[in-house]
Amino acid sequence: MLDTVIAASRVARADLKAIYTPATWVFGWLGRILAQVIFFALIGVLLEDRAALVYLFLGQAVMVAVVEVFMSIASTTWERRAGTLPLLVAAPRPLWPVFFGRSLQWIPSGAATSSVALFLLGPAFGITWDPVLALVAVPVLLTTVAAMYLMALTLAGVVLRSPRWRNVTSNVSHILVMLMCGVTVPVTIWPGWLQALGQGIPLTHGLQLIRELQAGQLGWDLGFAALLLVATGVGWGLCAAVSFTVFGEAGRRDGSIAFAE
């Protein structure tokens, strides 16, 4: 399985090189993302509320990585548009390792984007880090991005059945995630049942960890949040594997996978 993921990741690397040059990534994509983070941070500045400034800045600085990994919903469907999906379905191997590796490019790109916002842009707004805690925050951020990538793949496995909904699904889902996970408003404002749903999304716990690390608040709750982050990520990974497996088995059984839609 791992060899399939690694082989598929070569496609991801080729896609990233085709989409961005170093210059377009820095001055195009990164510039656009930093503008978004600055916009939300300025709301806190206008409110003259230091707590709101930090809350909005950290929320958006992590959320931008989620926006990027949710691009995997669209990039997963590229195999159908290219006409290679029927060949993958026909192959006598599980389908999910291919798609786990096929869009991996969004993880390092998203993590890099978010890291620049957190650690380089933050000081412009007076948001600084203890060096040791910043080092701890980096693997937390990477784990959060990877876990949200697995959530996106679950949605991608569903969208493969109807690729024309890929962009709508990506945009609507990351907006819902932003609302439910405490990115711009505390999760406590929502009804209990909605808060419970938010606990099943890795970003909720990853963002809690990032916020507490930046504030220097260390305690047992950090370990519990880290456990929930990993557990929800694994859960979404299993859901993604099931989603692709069900899709592949249905295609093999009834021959319903077309070369294009």
Image (cartoon, grey):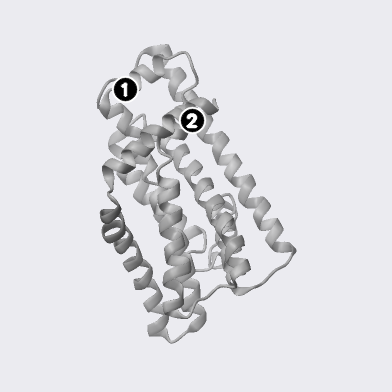
Q: Position of residue 28 (x, y in %)?
A: 26, 58
Please state which amino acid type lies under the numbered disc 2: Val
* Residue 117 numbered tag: none
77 with respect to 201 (left or right): left
Q: Identify the residue shown where x is 45% and y is 47%.
A: 107
213 with respect to 58 (left or right): right
* Residue 5 numbered tag: 2
Q: Position of residue 38 (x, y in %)?
A: 36, 72
> Where the N terminus falls, by quadrant?
top right
146 with respect to 64 (left or right): right
Q: Nearer the viewer, residue 149 or 164?
A: 149
Element carrying mark 2: helix
Q: Identify the residue shown where x is 46% and y is 76%.
A: 123
Q: Position of residue 239 (x, y in %)?
A: 54, 35
Q: How many C-alpha atoms fall within 10 Å of the one at disc 2: few (<14), some, or many (≥20)?
A: some
Measured in 3D between alpha carbons, the distance from the residue under mark 1 to the one under mark 2, in whole angstroms, is 16 Å
Q: How many C-alpha atoms fall within 10 Å of the one at disc 1: few (<14), some, or many (≥20)?
A: some
Q: Identify the residue shown where x is 62% and y is 67%.
A: 133
Most distant residue in the front direction: 22
* Mark with earlier residue (1, 2): 2
> Where the C terminus falls, by quadrant?
top left
| Residue 157, visible in the rendered structure | no
Q: Which residue is mark 1?
A: 84
Q: Identify the residue shown where x is 44% and y is 24%.
A: 247
Q: Nearer the viewer, residue 29 or 90?
A: 29
